[in-house]
Amino acid sequence: MTIKAVTTPVIALDVMGGDAGLADVMAAAEVASERYPKLAFRLHGPETLIRAELARCPRLAATAEVVHTDDVVLGTDKPSQALRRSRTSSMGMAIQSVKDGKAHAAVSAGNTGALMAMALFALRTMPGIDRPALAALLPTLKNDSVVLDLGANTECDAENLVQFAVMGAAFARTVLGLERPRVALLNIGEEALKGTDEIRDAAALLRGATLPMRFEGFVEGDKIGQGNVDVIVTDGFSGNIALKTAEGTGKLVTGLLAQAFRSSWLTQLGYLLSRGALRALRAHLDPNAHNGAVFLGLNGIVVKSHGSANIRGIANAIGVAHDLIADSVGARISEDLANFRAHRPELPKAEVAAS
């Protein structure tokens, strides 16, 4: 299969989403324009405010097209409410730009549930994909790991988990630059008999599959941070808990360190001696360094920036969209799924009888 490269990637940017505000979102697009000179943008939001900010963003102004709307999806809006305004809101219009072929990807820091609902309604799932999955990068002791699903699907069967594994591996090959990512299923133990029927059946299918990945079996929650696997696959309920727990643990560690270093003059001296290492730790755990979750499995690329991301974080989310466009991640997923279906392994009789 020949994958055609995109020479001028176009990003449809919802400039109204998230906590940062229009000015910071556009400043992030300016940073991304400097990193990726071939990028072009469709900016969805109030035209008067956008054009005022473009005067401060010369690189962005040179390539940007402004699409006016005053309608914005709020963080408190229910997905059903947002869907009714999909043709008029900045978020919905950005996704529509992808559907109409006017942009290669949409990026928003807005309401996650609304973005998921709008993206699924407008773009639908790719052939061979039953449900989309939300994937993101998580810092580990070694390199970043891809985790999915992070909340789009609370319950999943074996077929869903296999599809997530295929999509997650394609995402890791693109964003992490890995030829054969190591893939594992999140489970309550590493033994073959642990876990639900769905997890065990998915493992049996992945063990026998011929795919551009290395299936490593199961990984437990306390092993996620070790970085011994590149892609961690789970249902959205467990994945969201794992992500929030990891984020909370990172804040706990940095908070405890801050308290400890303020406790006496000796610990303050220790802080002065270890400032370099602490800065490195803070940078490694900074969510802005790993910003940019992706709804994989749709007929188009939609990237979710964290609502509280700063300029650097939003620019990184735009960078994720750029990389997925450049590497034609959708075509890679389709190719891997077709290969899996053509050489689909049979479940061992024990697994079939148990399920």
Image (cartoon, rainbow, N blue to C red):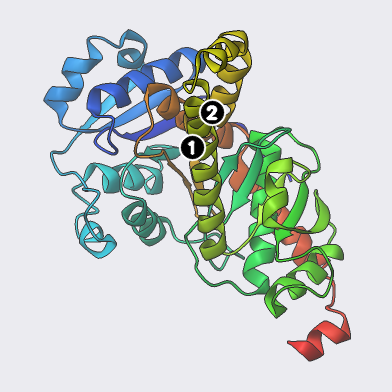
- SS assignment at label 1: helix
Q: Quadrant of residue 311?
A: top left
Residue 262 coordinates in the image, percent (x, y): 47, 21
- Nearest the camera: 61 or 267? 267
The kind of residue on which mark 2 rests is Leu
Residue 278 coordinates in the image, percent (x, y): 58, 19
Residue 40 visible in the displayed image:
yes
- Nearest the camera: 243 or 334? 243
For residue 176, the mark is: none
Residue 267 coordinates in the image, percent (x, y): 56, 17
- What residue did someone put label 1 on? 251
Residue at left 56%, top 68%?
130
Residue at left 13%, top 39%?
70
Residue 144 horizontal side relative to residue 253, left or right? right
- What residue did someone put label 2 on? 257
Residue at left 71%, top 71%?
199
Could you give the CA–CA distance between mark 1 and mark 2, rounded to whole angstroms?
Answer: 10 Å
Residue 274 horizontal side relative to residue 312, left or right? right
The kind of residue on which mark 1 rests is Lys
Residue at left 59%, top 27%?
284
Q: Is 40 above or below relative to 116?
A: above
